Image (cartoon, rainbow, N blue to C red):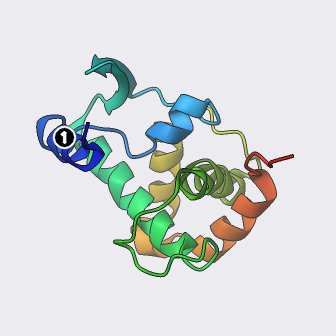
């Protein structure tokens, strides 16, 4: 199966795919608005609401952009290896939670997004340098032995 063609078709037919699906699949975070579905023998995580999915996509894109230097990928369009995407998703969400509340456990991504945007009304107001630093403290990927 051509993975690129699958992804392109998937995004076109399922516009509510969760941008934090890797973090949700790994159970490093949870979200009250996430649902699961199956497609072509694969499990997907989708959002319950289009507006919330767009909001999370904007925050994910901002995290990816701000993590660029830390993960040595300086172009937003460049493909990202799975391990680096996990750093962005798990580490970024935990880092945001820590900067916002001083606790890195993310029990509900939707609630975290609401609280973050209440404190920082524009995505650009979020102190991403602090979030990236906190992410490094609260997420360590698997290490090979």
Q: Pointer 1: what residue?
A: 15
Instruction: Point out residue 94 in the picture as x, y percentages from the top left corner.
Output: 66, 49
Q: Position of residue 142 (x, y in %)?
A: 75, 45
Q: Residue at x 22, y 40 (%)?
A: 6
Asked whether, in this view, residue 14 is left or right of residue 45, the answer is left
The tally of labels here is 1
Q: Is residue 139 above or below residue 79?
A: above
On the rendered image, what quadrant is the N terminus found in?
top left
Of residues 84 and 94, the one drawn nearer to the viewer in this rendering: 84
Image height check: is 33 above or below 61? above
Given residues 28 and 71, the one toward you in this image is: 71
Residue 43 quadrant = top left
- Give the vertical position of 75 relative to 29 (above or below): below
Instruction: Give left or right: position of 15 versus 127.
Output: left
Query: Residue 105, percent across and down?
Result: 71, 39
| Residue plotted at (50% across, 64% down) | 63
Image quadrant assignment for residue 88:
bottom right
Label 1: which secondary element: loop
Is residue 108 visible from the viewing direction of this image?
A: no
Tell me what residue is drawn at x 61 percent, y 47 percent. Answer: 90
* Residue at image location 67% in from the left, 57% down from the top: 95
Above or below residue 24? Residue 140 is below
Q: Residues within 10 Å of mark 1 (few under 14, many from 20)?
A: few
Question: Taking the image as drawn, is residue 1 in sight?
Answer: yes
Q: Among all residues in the image, which is located at the extreme right?
A: 145
Q: Nearer the viewer, residue 3 or 29?
A: 3
Horizontally, residue 85 falls left or right of residue 49, namely right
In percent of width and height, residue 15 lies at 18, 40
């Amino acid at each position: 199966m051509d993975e690129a063609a699958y992804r392109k078709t998937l995004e076109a037919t399922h516009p509510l795919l969760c941008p934090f699906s890797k973090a949700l699949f790994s159970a490093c975070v949870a979200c009250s608005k996430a649902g699961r579905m199956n497609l072509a023998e694969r499990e997907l995580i989708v959002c319950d609401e289009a507006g919330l999915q767009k909001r999370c996509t904007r925050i994910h894109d901002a995290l990816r952009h701000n993590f660029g230097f830390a993960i040595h990928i300086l172009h937003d369009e460049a493909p990202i290896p799975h391990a680096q995407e996990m750093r962005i998703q798990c580490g970024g969400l935990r880092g945001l939670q820590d900067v916002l509340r001083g606790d890195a456990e993310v029990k509900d991504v939707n609630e975290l997004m609401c609280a973050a945007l209440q404190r920082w009304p524009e995505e650009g107001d979020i102190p991403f340098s602090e979030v990236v630093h906190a992410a490094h403290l609260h997420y360590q990927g698997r290490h090979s032995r």
